[in-house]
Structures are given as structure tokens and as C-alpha cells.
Amino acid sequence: MSSFSLLSSTIPSTKNTKISFSRSPKTLSHNRFKVSCNANTATDDDNKQKASQSLEINQQNNNVDRRNVLVGLGGLYGAANLSSIPSAFAVPIQAPDNISLCVNAHAGIGNMTDAVKGVACCPPVPASDPVTGDAIAPPLYQLPPRPTTLRTRPTAQAAANDPVYLAKFMKAVKLMKALPDDDPRSWNNQGKIHCAYCNAGYTQEKSGFDTVNMQVHNSWLFFPFHRWYLYFLERIMGSLLGDDTFALPYWNWDNTDAMTGFPTAYELSMPSDTGGRPSPKNNPLFDGFRDATHVTATVDLQGGFVGTDEAMKNNNLAVVHDQMSVVGIAPFFGGLLSAGPRPTTMPGGSIEAGVHTRIHIWTGNPRMPNNEDMGNFYSAGYDPLFYCHHANVDRMWYLWKTVLNGGNNIDPTTSECGVDNPDPGCQLAGDWENSSFVFYDENKNLVRVKSGDCVDIEVMGYTYADSDISPWLNYSSTPHAAGSNIAADSIGKVKKVDELKFPLSIAETVKFLVKRPAVNRSHKEKKGTREILMINGIEFDGSAGFKFDVLIDDVDDGTPINASDSEFAGTFEQLQHGVGGSMKMTTGAMFGITGLLEELKADGDEYILVTIVPNYGCEKVTIGDVKIELLKIRR
């Protein structure tokens, strides 16, 4: 089992050394967009267990070692050696019983003065105990019996083409928007939920850390929190409509038919209740804080893609394929986060850090001071499109579990992990399944829910209408220049990685050669051990977002390399983590290159040529080390 040193809170002191640059950084029209999300930074004393990671990933399918197998690994497995996790780490994160302790949002909003949706993110406080005056602990929520007929979430296109459904959906949103501010079911209060859980409204006081903020993003809390969030919103709508079969629509941006603009229903012009000229402002699903230039534009799931609309859609399929093909709990769910100070290197999983974030950025309005609404977590929940987007994110979890990897992927629960499962996520499964959140239900009762109780959507009473996934599920990338021998030809012209001085700036495109630990491995060897490109010590200012692409054996002939090309190893993207000012953070990234090298006919090459292309925000970003390791995969 290989041992990897990935985590570091130490700030390197070695000065940059420039090397030759040949490819110009990509220019993005949306390079100001940021999705803001706060992360607690811990001191060295808080994280004494930082050490090299011993990683083994349980894999049953050997076709998933594509690019982005492990996106932004830094911190995925926490700050401890997970072969012997100390008991201090075995504490699940829980939302407080007393929600009156909630405070106004004060983190993750770059421009507090012009936060147009306001920073008051706290929900109405329930009645206290009439005798003691103390807060009443919310009871653990019990799922209703599974209904005979499941609520079926339709695609956004189907919803737009069904006048009966659409009228009902619009009525539900309208009814919620009409509820008073002291009603926890109101649209305004539902929008606040996302702000409170992401922008430092709550602390982890119930878990024993009353000075540590609760944060549901950039970790494995992401999927269960949002599943419960949509679950209760859906039930509130059904209750107001008097229809317990009502289900939210989902924006299937993974299907080429839904990759043009925002879903139609959310931009429809409608007459007012008193008549007059139709306007989208009269549509309860409309939000004025969306990027108006994207109303009918083709969705770019990679970010920075250059090409025709049809080429972009094809590239989008490659993006979804890569992010859905990851194996292992942490690579898909995100960092294995327990209670206490958050490690400074705690990224989200492949979908959260990928297409999820990309849609947020693509939808938010860059003309607003904080990219409201969808472009900032504090305001995203006020846009009805947020829930349509997250319904598809939730569907991605469902598909990853039931379809991808032959249906052999597992959730981080003790029952699914079983005994002696080597996946590091299984060693902390109790912390995931016992992590908990508080929500108001459709009867205005405050209840507590656990992550482990939301792993089966049919038990929760809903499912998804069909939408064809075969185009991305069966996607196969194409090499731009297979068998180019570019790495061998670059020896003597491009520096080898051991000739570089680190930390190395990636403000401009950088190229270097990395020696492989083995060549021409047998099929059996590849089946049990994967070849991983590791970029360690990515140092950055956490108060700003950035993105860079990683290319392997790019011949640099002027042709843009994208996710649909075999040379595209993957993307690393980091979101804003603070409220202005400098905040030094360090993380790492890993990219599976076994299949990629086969496609490029470079499996026998001693070196590979690595190109790091800054996409945006990399002016002050440096990397501390690059190497290739063989990662043993337990089958």
C-alpha cells in the first residue's frame, strides 16, 4: 500500500523560479464569478494528526481510472492516518438543538455592505419550554411509511410542457411567497436555510465545539444535507397544495436536450393577476438575479470551453462522465469531515466541486456585487432554479449508487461498508451516518434528521422520471495526438520536475516532465494498482477562487484541449473561502492517468509531459511538488 504525504498547513518559504511558458492562459468572460463558501481554518495544534495518507480504494470496475478519478484530494481523508483514527475524531457533526443561537451570516460574502438579500439568515425560533424557558430539543424525524405510489420528479422540460403540473408548481411557490415572515415554511425562510448552514449561521456546539462554524459544503455532508433540504421543501409544497403526490422538477443538464439556457418554465413571461403586458416578473419561478446572457446560451459544464455549441454539448458529456466515474467514498462525496476545527485542505467531491459549482457560477449574475443569487451560497436558496438544479445533483448521487460501477458503489454507512472494508470513508462511516441537521417540516415542527436516514430515495417516497444517460455513461474520449512521443522529444527542451525549484508559480502556463515509477505494466498489474499524478502543496489565498486545467502529453499545436480529449487529465477548481483579506491555505490534487496513457499510446514512455494551464485566479497560486505514484486498489 502506497503512502502519500498530501496535507500540509506549513507555508513554504522557497522563492519561485520561473520556467519557460508556451501556452497562453485561457481567458474567461466570467472570470469574476465566485461561489462563496466559508471554511474554518485550523491551527497546527488543532490538527496534530496531519500525516501521510495510506490509501486503498475499493474498486469493482476497472474502467473508471479516467481523468479526475480523485478531484482535489487534499484533505479528503482528513488530517489523520486513517488506519488508526484516534477516538477524538469519532464525533459526528450535528446542528444545534437551540436554533436561537443562530447568528447573521458573517462569512463567505465578499461584499457585506452590498449583500442585496441581507445577512439575516436565521429561521424563526420555536416556542421554548413553558416551565423552564429552555429550548426544546427537536425530535428525531421518522420517515412516513413508504407510499404505494412514489412522488416522481419530472424533468424540467416535461414540467414546462405539462400545463396542469406547471400551474400547480407555480401555485405552490406563490403560496410559499405569500406566507408571513414568522412562518418557517415561507419562501423567504426556506431561502435562509442555505445561508445559515453555509455562511456561519450555526456552530457545532452540540458536538462540543461551540466556537467552530458548521459548514455543509466542501465535505461529505454536502449530499445528505441537500437531499433533506429538498425533501422538506417538496413536502411543504405538497401540503400547501393539498397534494401529497407533488414532486419538484429537476434540471437534467447532463442531457444535451437540456443544455441550452435556463429551463423554459423559469423564464416564461406571464400576465399579472390583473392582466396587462406579459413579463417574466409575473412568473413566480423567475429570479431577476440570473445571468441574462445565459438565458438561451449553451451550458458550459467545463468552464472556459472554446468551440461550437454542439462541440460544447459533446464536451459536457465528457465532463459528466469523468465526474460520475469516480470510485471510492471520499472522491465522490467529498472530505471525510468529523466534528471540530475543519482542516484547511477539505475539498468537495467530484460532483460538488465540478458540475454543481459550474452551474451555480454559470447561473449567478456577474453584475451583482456578490454574484447573487445562484453565484453565492448565501443567496442561492432564494432562486427557484436552485432547487431544480439541486434535484439533478441529488439524482447524480442516486445514479452513482445504483448505476455507475455496475451498481457496486456504496454510501458511507456501517451496514454497506461491512467488515474490513479498506475504503477510508468506511472507517469514519459512523460519523457520516450520525451527522445531523435540523429542518422545519410541512407542519411547522422543528425536527432533526440524520444523514444515514436518507440513503434510499424510494424509502423517502420519491423517484426520478427517466432521462437518457447513455450518451455520457458510455462516453469515450478521443486522443488529439496519440503516439506523439512528445515527452521523449521534450527531454533537454523542457525541465524535469526534479530540476525545478518549488514552490512553483502557476500564474502562467507551466510545462515539465515527470518520471513514471513503472512502464508497460501488465493488465493484471493495472487492474490492481493505478497510476496517479499527484500535485501537492497547492498554496493559495482562500479569500479568492481559482481554477486550472491539467494536460498530459499535449503537443501544443494551437488546438484547444478539453475534457473530450484524452490529453485532458482534469480540472482543479477552488471556491472563495472567506470574507476578503488574505487567508493562506494549502491543498493537493490527484488525477488518475492509467487509462489516459493507454489512449495516448504512451504506456511505454519513461516520462510524461505535464502542462498546467491557469484558467482564472491563479496569479498568486503556487504548487509545492509533483510526482507520480502507484495507488493500490483493493478489489
Image (cartoon, rainbow, N blue to C red):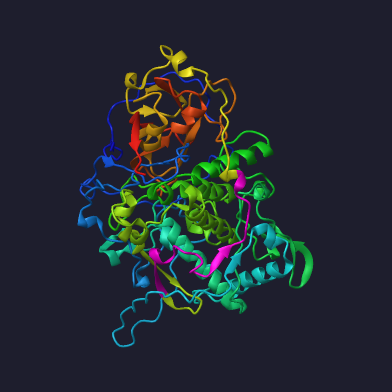
Question: Residue sitting at 59 percent across and 42 percent down?
Answer: 317
Q: Is residue 201 above or below residue 564?
A: below
Question: Residue sitting at 69 percent across and 56 percent down?
Answer: 264
Q: Is residue 532 above or below residue 418?
A: above
| Front position in the image: 278 or 502 | 502
Q: Outermost residue toward the bottom?
A: 131
| Front position in the image: 475 or 450 | 475
Where residue 478 sits: x, y (%)? Answer: 58, 31
Q: Is residue 182 above or below residue 283?
A: below
Task: Tell me if 41 is positioned left or right of 297 in this view.
Answer: left
Question: Residue sitting at 43 percent across and 13 percent down?
Answer: 493
Question: Residue sitting at 36 percent across and 63 percent down?
Answer: 202
Where residue 234 sits: x, y (%)? Answer: 55, 69
Residue 505 seen: yes
Where residue 20 sits: x, y (%)? Answer: 44, 18
Residue 213 seen: no
Name the quadrant containing residue 135: bottom left
Q: Quadrant of the C terminus?
A: top left
User: Is residue 454 located in the magenta-colored stretch of the structure?
Assistant: yes
Task: Tell me if 94 is positioned left or right of 193 in this view.
Answer: left
Magenta residues span 447-471
Where residue 340 sits: x, y (%)? Answer: 27, 57
Q: Quadrant of the N terminus?
A: top left
Q: Outermost residue toward the top?
A: 492
Q: In this figure, what is the number of numbered marks? A: 0
User: Is residue 172 located in the magenta-colored stretch of the structure?
Assistant: no
Name the quadrant containing residue 543: top left
Task: Tell me if 409 is positioned left or right of 320 in this view.
Answer: left
